[in-house]
Image: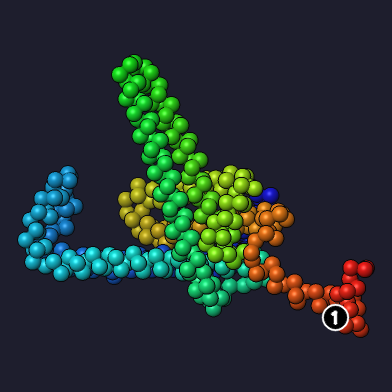
């Protein structure tokens, strides 16, 4: 089944290859907008405050960096408005980044969902914009819910790690060998627990967006649907882990190839710029492929669970029933009226 899902996902991404181009454009927009909202105000602040960037680059310790900024304290008090302007530019940049990401991601998952359900569906800019506008608020709210799950699990891992450190300290007071054994044991336990707990919020995030796309539910209903799906299909955790390992492996290969250009003295510097473009394009393609694989897996496994899909409060499962029944009725008895056909169907 995994190979089938991967093959279907590749075909879906190839049919909607414009989504990869949109992702590639998003990367460039975020890069250049950083210089527009943050880089230019920081450059102006450096000139007004009399800061020397070369001194900061030559600093080898944190105290050296503080000494550079300490001399600009008087100028900071004088040009406090410029400092506020820089902070405002940074805040504006992050706000723009969040809004653009939510819109682009909402449009991407909407188009992917339509392409998975309907193999004849093709990409269009009008449909992409409509999907992004329709899913902007649900994606934004559900992203915050998933972020809270990450924070809660990080807090839980921190508590477990602090308890393990206390136990190791008590063991060190008794015997060094026992403390060494407990240190290795708890590190392995924390690593295993951390990896397992990391899969949970990631599963809630990715499969939740899939549920939101196919069922068209609200964020809270999406969370309930996703938790029920993960409870019924625990193999989804393992599938997500395999997909993440593949994603990390491809990224590592790309980084190793890029590291080879650094070794070359002159040719490497010339080839590094086009290679970065190829790397960003590959990153956009692999990211879209990973989302398509997870969406196909959710669609296939959820569709094969008859006790889950009909229970969803989705309008999409009820609307197609009305236009399909008259078509079947007209085929079965084209000369009879519609109420008579509906009354005769149970008798047949």
Q: Toward the viewer: 330 or 98?
A: 330
* Residue 300 visible here: no
* Res 24 quadrant in image: bottom left
Looking at the image, residue 53 lies above or below residue 322: above
Asked if residue 64 is positioned above or below residue 33 in the image, the reply reads above
- Residue 299 visible somewhere in the drawing: yes
Residue 38: % across, % down:
26, 66
Count of numbered circles on the image: 1
Task: Label 1: state its secondary structure.
Answer: helix
Left or right: where 69 falls relative to 337: left
Residue visible at 32% across and 50% down in the picture = 265
Q: Quadrant of the C terminus?
A: bottom right
Q: Which residue is mark 1?
A: 338
Q: Is residue 309 toward the left or the right of residue 37 in the image?
A: right
Local crowd size for mark 1, using a 10 Å CA cut-off: few (<14), some (14–19), many (≥20): some
Q: Quadrant of residue 182?
A: top left
Identity of the residue drawn at 12% across and 55% down = 69
Q: Coloring scheme of the render?
A: rainbow
Relative image position of residue 13 (x, y in whole percent) = 59, 63
Is 12 left, or right, of 321 in this rendering? left
Report the residue at 9% width, 58% height from top: 73
Residue 87 placement (x, y as % from top left)? 23, 64
Residue 209 location, x and y as percent?
A: 54, 60
Nearer the observer, 86 or 11: 86
Residue at 29% across, 65% down: 91
């Amino acid at each position: 089944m995994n190979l089938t899902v991967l093959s279907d996902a590749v075909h879906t991404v190839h049919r909607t290859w414009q989504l990869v181009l949109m992702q590639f454009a998003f990367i460039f927009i975020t890069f250049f907008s950083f210089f527009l909202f943050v880089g230019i105000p920081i450059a102006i602040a450096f000139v007004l405050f009399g800061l020397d960037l070369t001194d900061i680059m030559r600093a080898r310790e944190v105290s050296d960096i503080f000494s550079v900024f300490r001399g600009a304290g008087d100028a900071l008090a004088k040009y406090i408005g410029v400092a506020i302007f820089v902070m405002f530019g940074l805040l504006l940049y992050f706000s723009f980044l969040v809004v653009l990401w939510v819109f682009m991601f909402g449009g991407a998952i909407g188009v992917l969902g339509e392409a998975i359900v309907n193999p004849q569906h093709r990409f269009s800019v009008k449909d992409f914009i409509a999907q992004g506008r329709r899913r902007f608020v649900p994606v934004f709210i559900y992203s915050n819910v998933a972020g809270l799950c990450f924070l809660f699990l990080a807090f839980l891992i921190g508590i477990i790690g602090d308890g393990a450190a206390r136990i190791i300290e008590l063991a060190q007071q008794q015997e060094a060998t026992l403390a060494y054994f407990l240190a290795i044991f708890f590190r392995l336990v924390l690593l295993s627990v951390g990896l397992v707990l990391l899969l949970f919020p990631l599963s809630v995030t990715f499969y939740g967006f899939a549920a939101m796309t196919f069922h068209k539910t609200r964020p809270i209903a999406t969370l309930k649907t996703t938790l029920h799906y993960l409870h019924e299909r625990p193999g989804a955790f393992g599938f997500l882990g395999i997909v993440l390992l593949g994603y990390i492996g491809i990224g590592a290969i790309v980084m190793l190839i890029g590291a080879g250009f650094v070794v070359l003295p002159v040719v490497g510097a010339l080839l590094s710029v086009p290679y970065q473009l190829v790397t960003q394009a590959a990153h956009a393609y692999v990211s879209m492929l990973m989302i398509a694989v997870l969406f196909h897996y959710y669609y296939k496994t959820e569709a094969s669970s008859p006790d889950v899909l009909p229970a969803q409060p989705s309008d999409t499962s009820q609307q197609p029933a009305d236009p399909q029944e008259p078509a079947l009725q007209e085929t079965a008895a084209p000369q009879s009226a519609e109420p008579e056909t509906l009354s005769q169907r149970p008798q047949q």
